[in-house]
Image (tube, helix red, strand yellow):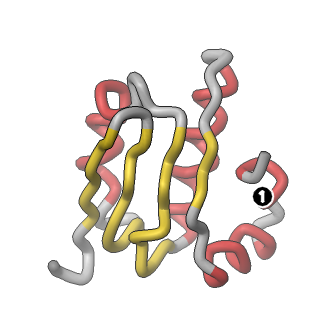
Amino acid sequence: MSNHALSWTQSEATLLLTGTLNRESLLAFWKQRDSLLKHVELLDVSGLHHVDSTGLAMLVRLKGEFIEQKRFLNIIGMSDNLLTLMELYSVKSLLLD
């Protein structure tokens, strides 16, 4: 896996993200998000080893899109580093239910 690789696997209503979620890696996921997230209710980010501010912004945007569509998205598996980043950008309350 390269430093900028992001991959995902789906199992029923759960989508697991693995690798790096940053500016370089998220474009492929973003382009496919509608079909990937069609039946997803749980986004597991425990497999991410690095998330930058762009990756965090994507998570906030995804959560917002779900809210606009009156759908539920629970994000689980946040690392201590991701939780710290969420606090620094004051978005923790947006992502945690």
Residue at 27% across / 35% down in the picture? 32
Q: Secondary structure at mark 1?
A: loop
Amino acid type for the residue under numbered disc 1: Val
Q: In terms of image quadrants, where is residue 85?
A: bottom right
Q: Residue 74, relative to residue 4: is it above or below? A: above
Q: Residue at x 34, y 56 (%)?
A: 26
Q: Residues within 10 Å of mark 1 (few under 14, many from 20)?
A: some
Compared with residue 34, is residue 63 higher up or lower down, i.e. above or below? Answer: below
Question: Which residue in the structure is indicated by mark 1?
Answer: 91
- Residue 49: where, in percent of width, then height? 42, 80
Left/right placement of residue 35 relative to residue 65 reads left
Question: Where, quadrant-wise, is the C terminus in this rendering?
Answer: top right
Q: Position of residue 41 (x, y in %)?
A: 53, 34
Residue 25: horizontal and vertical position, in percent? 29, 63
Q: Quadrant of the N terminus?
A: bottom left
Q: Is residue 96 left or right of residue 39?
A: right
Towards the viewer: 48 or 41: 41
For the point 72% across and 68% down, which residue is it?
A: 86
Q: Which of the pair 58/93 is nearer the observer?
A: 93
Query: Is residue 9 shown left or right of residue 34?
Result: left
Q: How many marks?
A: 1
Residue 65 x %, y %: 59, 29
